[in-house]
Amino acid sequence: MNSETQAQKQIIASLKTIGNNFLKTSKHLRNVEKSCRDASEKFQQTTR
């Protein structure tokens, strides 16, 4: 296998990893957003 093909395989693997990390991060941020919203609602209830 030549070095160009090897480099292409490494790039593809890296892009897949970046894509997977992006998906994990977006899921995490949705959970954070939900937690913040829940905390905000609870806080509003206690201050009324």
Image (tube, rainbow, N blue to C red):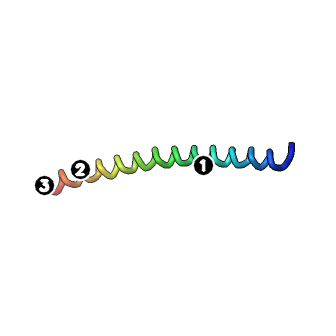
Location of the N terminus by quadrant is: top right
Q: Can you tell which mark lies on residue 18?
A: 1
- First in residue order: circle 3 vs circle 1: 1
Q: Which amino acid does label 3 sit on?
A: Arg
Q: 26 and 5: which one is in front?
A: 5
Front of the two marks 3 and 1: 1
Q: 46 and 23: which one is in front?
A: 23
Label 3: which secondary element: loop
Quote the CA–CA distance across marks 1 and 2.
34 Å
- First in residue order: circle 1 vs circle 2: 1
Label 2: which secondary element: helix
Return the x and y of residue 24 as percentages of the image width and height. 52, 45
The answer to whether the residue labelled 3 contacts the one labelled 1, judged by CB atoms less than 8 Å apart, is no
Which residue lies at the image location 29% right of the left edge and 51% below the top edge? 39
Residue furthest out toward the bottom: 47
Location of the C terminus by quadrant is: bottom left
Q: How many residues crowd mark 2 within 10 Å: few (<14), some (14–19), many (20+)?
A: few
Q: Which amino acid does label 1 sit on?
A: Ile
- First in residue order: circle 3 vs circle 2: 2
Front of the two marks 1 and 2: 1
Quote the CA–CA distance across marks 3 and 1.
45 Å
Which residue lies at the image location 86% right of the left edge and 46% below the top edge? 2
Return the x and y of residue 29 as percentages of the image width and height. 43, 50
The answer to whether the residue labelled 1 contacts the one labelled 2, judged by CB atoms less than 8 Å apart, is no
Return the x and y of residue 6 as percentages of the image width and height. 80, 46
The residue that disc 2 covers is 41
The residue that disc 3 covers is 48
Q: How many residues crowd mark 3 within 10 Å: few (<14), some (14–19), many (20+)?
A: few
